[in-house]
Amino acid sequence: MKERRISNKMLAERMGVHRNTIQQLKEAHPTMIRLRHLEQLCQVLNCQPSDLFELSPEIAGVTSGT
């Protein structure tokens, strides 16, 4: 969100959620996200879901069967 120069407060307002929701998404490294929030994030930031996530090595090992 730094690249887009948008504050947590402004993002929360545009998404219609509380600032705490944005803070949790940024700092808590959530393992789940509500689809509604993901759609809102992508709309506000003009991006794709894949732009927002990266696969952790632990998860990659589990999903690849290694």
Image (cartoon, rainbow, N blue to C red):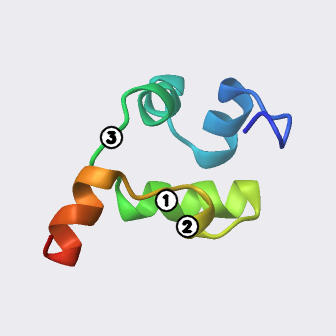
C-alpha span from label 2 to label 1: 7 Å
C-alpha span from label 3 to label 2: 14 Å
**Along the line of sight, which residue is nearer the eye, 10 or 64?**
64
Residue type at mark 3 is Pro
Q: Is residue 32 visible?
A: no
Quadrant of the frame with the N terminus: top right
Q: Which of marks 3 and 1 is in front?
A: 3
Quadrant of the frame with the C terminus: bottom left
**Along the line of sight, which residue is nearer the eye, 49 or 60?**
60
- Circle 2 packing at 10 Å, graded few (<14), some (14-19), many (20+), is few
C-alpha span from label 3 to label 1: 12 Å
Judge whether 5 appears above or below 41 on screen: above
Examine the image and state in which quarter residue 25 appears. top left
Q: Residue 30 carries which label?
A: 3
Q: Residue beneath label 2, please?
A: 49
Residue type at mark 1 is Leu
46 with respect to 40 (left or right): right
Residue at image coords 60%, 47%:
15
User: Mark 3 or mark 2, which has the lower sequence index?
Assistant: 3
7 with respect to 19 (left or right): right
Judge whether 60 appears above or below 25 on screen: below
- Which structural element holds mark 2? helix
Q: Residue beneath label 1, please?
A: 38
Q: Do the residues labelled 3 and 1 touch (CB within 8 Å)?
A: no
Q: Where is residue 32 in the image (x, y as percent from the top left)?
A: 28, 51
